[in-house]
Amino acid sequence: MPDLLPGAENFPRTAVLSEQVHRVLGLNPSAFTGPGTNTYLLGAPGGTPLLMDTGVGLPEYLDLLKAHLAREGFRPLTRILLTHVHGDHIGGVADVLGEFPGIPVHKFPWPERDRAYDLSLEPIVDGQLFTGDGYTLRAVHTPGHAQDHICYYLKEERALFTGDVILGVGTTVIPQDGGNLTHYLDTLRKLQTLDLARIYPGHGPVIDTPREKIAEYLAHRLQREQQILSELSGGRHTVEEMVRSIYREYPERLYAAAGQSVLSHLDKLESEGRVAREHGDPPRFTLLD
């Protein structure tokens, strides 16, 4: 659940992160996106790069992208890769295609959500390779935050583009629409098996301690589960009551996102037979023996 970084207004609008990787900020800072959505250009200097994610679709983002491509001597884009269907990652595709018509857009399918964007999308499969000037990328299906979520492993740097699975600031929300905490924990354990030296997240700064960050994310989820079980040991509670207790040191503007995370834990615990849901408005949850 990202909060704004101290000094987020000074987070670089563009950055050269390595010989193969450039970051162009989506210019949509908020309590949920941190400094904004990171979009990435991959390719050797002077080559034809790909674009990973496209921001939410702000006109000033397209201007920023074009200016960076020109300044760094890139030739026109060859393709777009998407991490998932959430609007701050896919929303700018139409604008980018308006500037670079005819380039393919690749995405792991989620037909019920994809059709809202009226785009021609080329389906990605788990393990698919994408190669170009200076990069070899492997798609890694990573459901949990969203059922269509894909991370991309950059062979040349032993680096992973994590979209919203791992963030450079805060923790990931597991939404009710397409999210699943059990799948998310499985995804984190899957990422632990990769040979990683760096993480390029969908929000926030680069992570140069990937193994520690993944372990931190797993520990955080286990700690949150124990907090929820502890709350329920004292009786029946609504999600809002648990949020106000567990997140009492956080600003209230984050409570809506916190409620989604608490509910994702409760869904998991209910599926495991450890918690019962008493239907009502709002529902209450009870710890089972």
Image (cartoon, rainbow, N blue to C red):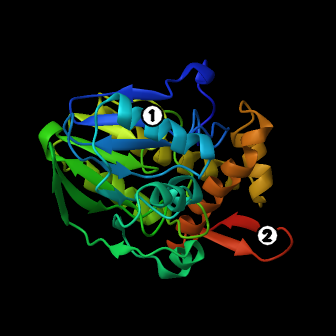
Residue 85 to residue 255: above or below:
below
Does residue 235 appear in the picture of this structure? no
Q: Percent position (x, y) of residue 36?
A: 57, 38
Q: Percent position (x, y) of residue 209?
A: 29, 29
Q: Amino acid at mark 2?
A: Pro
Quadrant of the image for the N terminus?
top right
Q: Is residue 145 left or right of residue 41?
A: right
Q: Which mark is residue 67?
A: 1
Q: Which mark is residue 283?
A: 2
Which residue occupies the foreground of this view, 92 or 100?
A: 100
Mark whose residue sits in front, 1 or 2? 1
* Crowd band around label 2 with a 10 angstrom C-alpha radius: few (<14), some (14–19), many (20+): few
* Crowd band around label 1 with a 10 angstrom C-alpha radius: few (<14), some (14–19), many (20+): few
Sooner in the amino-acid sequence: mark 1 or mark 2: 1
Q: Amino acid at mark 1?
A: Ala
At horizontal 70% and vertical 53% (from top left) the residue drawn is 259
Which residue occupies the foreground of this view, 221 or 171?
A: 171
At horizontal 70% and vertical 73% (from top left) the residue drawn is 277
As helix, strand or loop, the secondary structure at mark 2 comes to: loop
Within the image, what quadrant is residue 21 found in?
A: top left
Q: CA distance from mark 1 to mark 2?
A: 51 Å
Q: Percent position (x, y) of residue 58?
A: 62, 47
Q: Is residue 242 left or right of residue 111?
A: right
Q: Percent position (x, y) of residue 178?
A: 54, 70
Residue 90 to residue 241: above or below:
below
Q: How many marks?
A: 2
Q: Is residue 283 left or right of residue 44?
A: right
What is the residue that sits farthest to the right in this orientation?
281
At horizontal 17% and vertical 40% (from top left) the residue drawn is 158
